Image (tube, grey):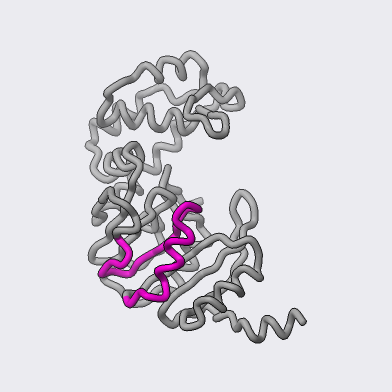
Amino acid sequence: MPLKPLFGSLNNTIAKTIALNNPNYSKIVEPFGDDGTYALFTAKKPANSHTVNIVDPDLLAAMQFAQSYSTSDFSALKNEDWIGSPDTFNQVQTISDAEGEKFIYKFLYNKFFAMSMSGSDELSFDILSLNVDKKNKLFAFPLMKSLLKKVEFVSMDPMSLIPSDGFMILIPPTAYLEPTKAKLSGLSGQFFFAGKVSDGMAAVSDAQAMSKLNVHGASVAGIMMSTYSFVTNYDSRLTKIDPEMMKGAMS
């Protein structure tokens, strides 16, 4: 089984779809890196430059650590306590103003062993992770360092990066979905857009609204099966939705 990055990777189905249906490019730009970055997909075609935008400061620091940690940083990280326990969880919460390895230890320990109530930022120990050992997860770090070698990280409003002068991978979270979709028809630079929709007919509605673009509906496996509209402004292997044909099939 291939190693998977610890954080930041796209849904595997979406990443493979992009890799099989990308245009020729020398530069990749990802305005919405917080929700997963194509930079960490092993099967992508290499680019001369790759820009990933991450707004969340903690995730940004974690990605930068994964990009450039030293051997001593990694050794210290591996020697931390990676077994789930309420006592260790409480000790980890006392780490403050941390940088480098200590910051990553707190960041990952909470990712592995913490939980929070919906709508709350307060963390508590996840009892289902009691005595679980996550140390082997750290073996993904060397892979991440290799994949992030040419990546430039930025932190800005995602919408300010649309349009960009590279191949744009646009996979916005819910809050940015409609504003991003509204920009697609006016973009001249090449892009691949993936946005969740309620069902297949919503993808057909996207095809009607963006008749000059290539719109494709797809079911994507994740924690739950979701339906997406994939939209491009270049030719690919994806089959374009014909809204008129779909209307006829539904009547």
Question: Image height check: is 168 above or below 80?
Answer: below
Q: Quadrant of residue 63?
A: top left
Q: Position of residue 47 (x, y in %)?
A: 28, 66
Question: Image height check: is 60 above or below 74?
Answer: below
Question: Image height check: is 9 above or below 95?
Answer: below
Q: Quadrant of residue 232?
A: bottom left
Question: Image height check: is 196 above or below 110?
Answer: below
Check residue 149 for magenta coloring.
no
Which range of residues does the magenta coloring cover?
Answer: 161-188
Question: Residue at 40% of width from left, 37% of height from top?
Answer: 138
Check residue 169 for magenta coloring.
yes
Residue 72 appearing in the image: yes
Task: Judge by depth and name the residue closer to the eye, 43 or 59.
Answer: 59
Residue 46 appearing in the image: no
Q: How many marks?
A: 0
Question: Residue at 31% of width from left, 20% of height from top?
Answer: 96
Q: Is residue 78 left or right of residue 124?
A: left
Q: Position of residue 201 (x, y in %)?
A: 66, 70
